[in-house]
Image (cartoon, rainbow, N blue to C red):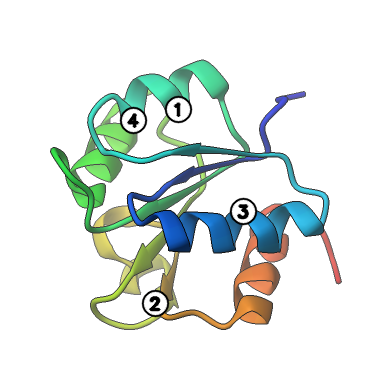
Amino acid sequence: MSATDILLIEDEPNIAEAVRFILTRDGWRLDHWSEGSQALARIAALQPRLVILDVMLPAQSGLEVLAALRADPMLAATPVLMLTARGTAGRGAMAPGGADRVVAKPFDNDDLRRVVSEMLGRSG
């Protein structure tokens, strides 16, 4: 079993801290990375059960990270929740770049908790 349930890739410190607080309070083990560059190596090293990925990242966008993730046969099945200030929340075909789900910023804490729990198979 992975030591990291969730890898959060988010460059805004306030948002990263809020997500960390919300999700670790529910018992999820979370690691944080703040930029798109080297994100794929970080995902490969940690093998998280879920990646929460911001769309707007320095150096390499979240959509570029997602495209590289989906192109890697060893990592392609990793569930991805995109956080975006652009567009709206959604799932599947409505989500950008092949993300499994999308949560729009600013997000409601309970909505984020619910989506993460659904994606990781925990009820409540």
> How far apart in space, not on screen, are marks 3 and 1 (Cα)?
17 Å
Disc 4 element: helix
Picture coordinates of residue 80 (x, y %)? 46, 50
Along the polypeptide, which appears first: circle 1 or circle 2? 1
Q: Nearer the viewer, residue 119 or 111?
A: 111
Label 4–label 1 contact, CB within 8 A: yes
Kindly identify which residue carries mark 2: 105
Label 2–label 3 contact, CB within 8 A: no
Mark number, residue 20 = 3
Residue 21 position by quadrant: bottom right
Q: Residues within 10 Å of mark 2 (few under 14, many from 20)?
A: some
Q: Is residue 45 above or below residue 32?
A: above
Q: Nearer the viewer, residue 9 or 13?
A: 13
Picture coordinates of residue 112 (x, y %)? 60, 71
For the view shown, which residue lies furthest in the left direction?
Answer: 59
Disc 2 element: loop
Along the polypeptide, which appears first: circle 2 or circle 3? 3
Kindly identify which residue carries mark 4: 39
Residue type of the residue flagged with mark 1: Ile
Residue type of the residue flagged with mark 2: Lys
Kindly identify which residue carries mark 1: 43
Residue 71 position by quadrant: top left
